[in-house]
Amino acid sequence: MKITLDIKENRLSTFLAFIKTLDYVSISKEDSIPQWQKDEVNQRLKDLEKYPERAVDFDQVMEDMEKKYGL
């Protein structure tokens, strides 16, 4: 059986220390970032290295969007 617990950050280390003493409990951590998203970011980083001239300045994009959409 799997159970998901939501534990306050300031209580986590104490709780985990206790849980680890139980021989019938195993602890696994799930990554909150899906693999497809990691793959996409890695591909974009490779593309950026290969074609740095295609990079777009974030501040410029934000400025353009503000002008275009009146934000």
Image (tube, grey):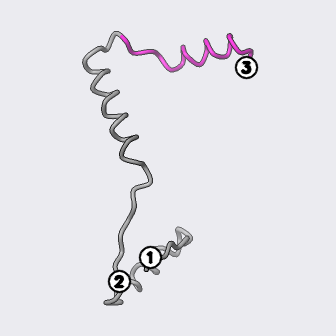
Instruction: Tell me, for residue 2, which label it has, or none.
Output: 1
Residues at discs 2 and 1 in contact (Cβ within 8 Å): no
Three-letter code, disc 3: Leu
| Whole-percent x, y for residue 71 in the image | 73, 19
Mark 1 packing: few (<14 Cα in 10 Å), some, or many (20+)? few
| Whole-percent x, y for residue 44 in the image | 34, 27
Query: Which of the two residues, 32 or 1, is positioned nearer the viewer here?
Result: 1
46 left or right, relative to 40: left
Instruction: Tell me, for residue 48, which label it has, or none.
Output: none
Query: Closer to the N terminus: mark 2 or mark 1?
Result: 1
Give the residue number, with chain letter if any, for mark 2. 20
Which residues, given as a range, are shown in magenta? 54-71
Name the element at disc 1.
loop
Q: Is residue 16 above or below residue 23?
A: above
10 left or right, relative to 55: right
Name the element at disc 2.
loop
Three-letter code, disc 1: Lys
Mark 2 packing: few (<14 Cα in 10 Å), some, or many (20+)? few
Give the residue number, with chain letter if any, for mark 3. 71
Name the element at disc 3.
loop
Q: Is residue 55 above or below residue 25?
A: above
| Whole-percent x, y for residue 46 in the image | 27, 26
Residue closest to the far left: 50
User: Which residue occupies 52% across, 73% down?
Assistant: 5
User: Which residue occupies 44% across, 54% down?
Assistant: 32
